[in-house]
Image (spheres, grey):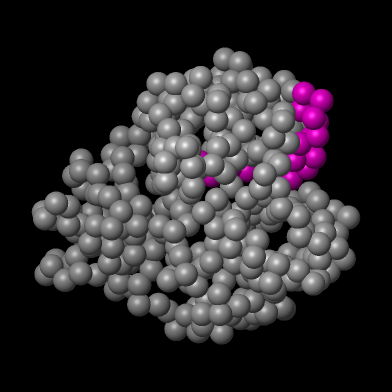
Amino acid sequence: MTSATLAKTPLHALHLELGARMVPFAGYDMPVQYPLGVLKEHLHTREQAGLFDVSHMGQIMLRGPKAAEALEHLVPVDIIDLPVGMQRYAMFTDTNGGILDDLMVANLGNDTLFLVVNAACKDQDLAHLQKHIGDQCEIIDFFESRALLALQGPKAAEVLARLAPEVTKMTFMQFTQVRLLGVDCYVSRSGYTGEDGYEISVPNQQAETLARSLLAEPEVQPIGLGARDSLRLEAGLCLYGHDMSTETTPIEASLLWAISKPRRADGARAGGFPGAKRVFEQQQDGVPSKRVGLLPQERVPVRESSEIVDAEGKVIGKVTSGGFGPTLGAPVAMGYVSNSHSAVDTEVWAIVRGKRVAMKVAKTPFVPQRYYRG
C-alpha cells in the first residue's frame, strides 16, 4: 500500500506537523517516532507522560439485555459478572482453542458493553460478532467516528486531572464517562506500557483539540509506535500476530491468568467458549511448548523469528518479539520454547545472523508494572 491508499487517523495532520516519521501499520499511516527518537520517547514515558495515537484500533459497542451472556459464549472470561464501571482483558478463541484476537471489554451499565479490539483484526472481529451474536444484541462499530488516545506514564494522572479532577479517583481497569474540554469521552485507567495511565475514546471531531491540549502540558511528549513496542515488551505484554495467534492457545501463550476462574475446568461456569475442550486438556496435561521471557546475555538485540536452540544445536523454539529495552539498558525478548527448556534461568541460544547468542529464560515483566490500584 502507498501512503495515498493507507487509512489515516484524525490526528494524521498533527503527526506530520510534529515531525513524525510515518510508516504503514495495520493499513494505516502511523507515526513510528518523532524527532525526540524512540529511545528518549520510551524513557520519557517511563519518567513523565507520553501521548499515543491508537485511533487505528477498533471500538465496538454491544447493547441489549442479552449482550453480556452472548459475548461470554465467545470469550473465556467472565462477562456476566463484570461489575459496572470495570473493564477486563479478553480473547476471542476459535473451535481449536487458537486465539483470534485479544481485546478489552468494559461494562458501561444499562446493558451496554464497550469493546476495544486490535487494528489488524477489527473487521474480522466485527464480522465474528455479527455472525455469532448479532441476533442477540445490537452491535455498533465506531471505526470511523471515534478516536482513541493513550496517555501513559507516572505523570498521566496529574496531567489529565487538570481537565477532569475526578480521574484521580479511578483505579486500574476502571472505565467511565468523563467530560473533557466540554466533550463526553469514555476513559479507562489502563494502557499497554506497564505504566499508570489512561485510554481516552473521543469523537473524531474533537480528537485533535484534546491531543493539542494534552501535548501543551510540560510533562507530555508525543510517542510513536517504536517506543510503544519497546514499552509493552519490557512490561511482558503480548502483541497479537506475534506472541499469540490462531496457532497458539491461551495455555501455550502463558495466559491462563486471563481465563476467569469461573470459566476454567473446575469453575462454576466451566467452558462455554470455543475450543474449551482443547484448552482444558492442555491445562491438565501440559503443552509441548510455551511462551517465556528471554534475556540475551550479550548486547545483541535478538529479533522476531530468530530460531532458539539448545546446547546441542537442536531447534527448540523461536523468538516472537525482541529488541532493546531502554529502561533495562539491555536487549529483551519473548518467544516459545519446548516445555523442557521453559524453567526460569534455563540457558538457551538464539541464532542471529548465523551465530549463537546465549540467552536465559526469565520471568516477565522485565520491568515492574506500575498500574495504580489505589
**Can the viewer see residue 369 in this picture?**
no
Q: State left or right for residue 180 relative to residue 279.
A: right
Magenta run includes residue 185: yes
Q: Is residue 124 above or below residue 359?
A: below
Q: Is residue 228 above or below residue 303?
A: above
Which residue appears at 55% of the width and 30% of the height? Answer: 12
Name the one closer to the observer, 225 or 78: 225
Magenta run includes residue 42: no
Name the one closer to the observer, 160 or 364: 160
Q: Position of residue 354 (x, y in %)?
A: 11, 55
Which residue appears at 54% of the width and 42% of the height? Answer: 7
**Can the viewer see residue 68 in this picture?**
yes
Q: Position of residue 310 (x, y in %)?
A: 18, 67
Which residue appears at 31% of the width and 44% of the height? Answer: 323
Q: Position of residue 187 (x, y in %)?
A: 72, 39
Q: Position of residue 298 (x, y in %)?
A: 18, 44
Which residue appears at 62% of the width and 50% of the height? Answer: 58
Which image quarter holds the C terminus?
top right
- For the record, the magenta segment spans 172-193
Q: Is residue 127 above or below residue 160?
A: below
Q: Is residue 8 above or below residue 295?
A: above
Q: State left or right for residue 194 relative to residue 315.
A: right
